[in-house]
Amino acid sequence: VQLQASGGGLVQAGGSLRLSCAVFGDIYSINLMGWYRQAPGNQRELVATYETGGTTNYADSVKGRFTVSRDNAKNTVDLQMSSLKPEDTAVYYCHVRSIDYDRALGFFEDEYWGPGTLVTVSS
């Protein structure tokens, strides 16, 4: 299974960017897709998630500015970021929580991370 993300880059404060992530490979089912970020010197933190049932969750710092969307048929998750601030500068990681199947193990929970895409917001 591989996650491929795109859409990062440099933008001025107040601008917008859209991140996209696609999942390639065999997964029995995806429970949750979302985005995390890690700024220099900081721990990785949740940005936004989208559960299969439609429930979304956002970090307080991005509520009202970021929107996560998901296409279950295509196994993609997007993050529309608006009103960007310099403090949004970070490497953004796509994340998937899944149920996988193995003939020996049966069903089991698993998770996957994308390679990260850099978002830089200049003041």
Image: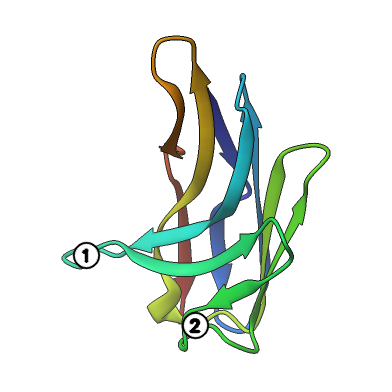
The label nearer to you, 1 versus 2, is 1
**How far across and down, in percent of the image, does residue 40 sit?**
22, 63
Q: Quadrant of residue 29?
A: top right
As helix, strand or loop, the secondary structure at mark 1 comes to loop
Please tell me whether residue 110 is drawn above or below residue 69 in the rendered image. above
Mark 1 and mark 2 lie on one chain; the one further toward the N terminus is 1
**How far apart are the two marked residues, 1 and 2, measured between alpha carbons?**
19 Å
As helix, strand or loop, the secondary structure at mark 2 comes to loop
Mark 1 crowdedness (10 Å alpha carbons): few <14, some 14-19, many ≥20: few
Q: Amino acid at mark 2?
A: Lys
Residue that carries the numbered disc 2 in the rendered image: 85
Residue 22 is marked as: none
| Residue name at image x 58 percent, y 40 percent | 5
Q: Quadrant of the C terminus?
A: bottom left
Front residue (pair 95, 37): 95
| Residue name at image x 62 percent, y 42 percent | 30
| Residue name at image x 43 percent, y 79 percent | 86
Q: Amino acid at mark 1?
A: Gln
Q: How is the image coloured?
A: rainbow
**How far across and down, in percent of the image, does residue 47 sit?**
48, 70
Residue that carries the numbered disc 1 in the rendered image: 43
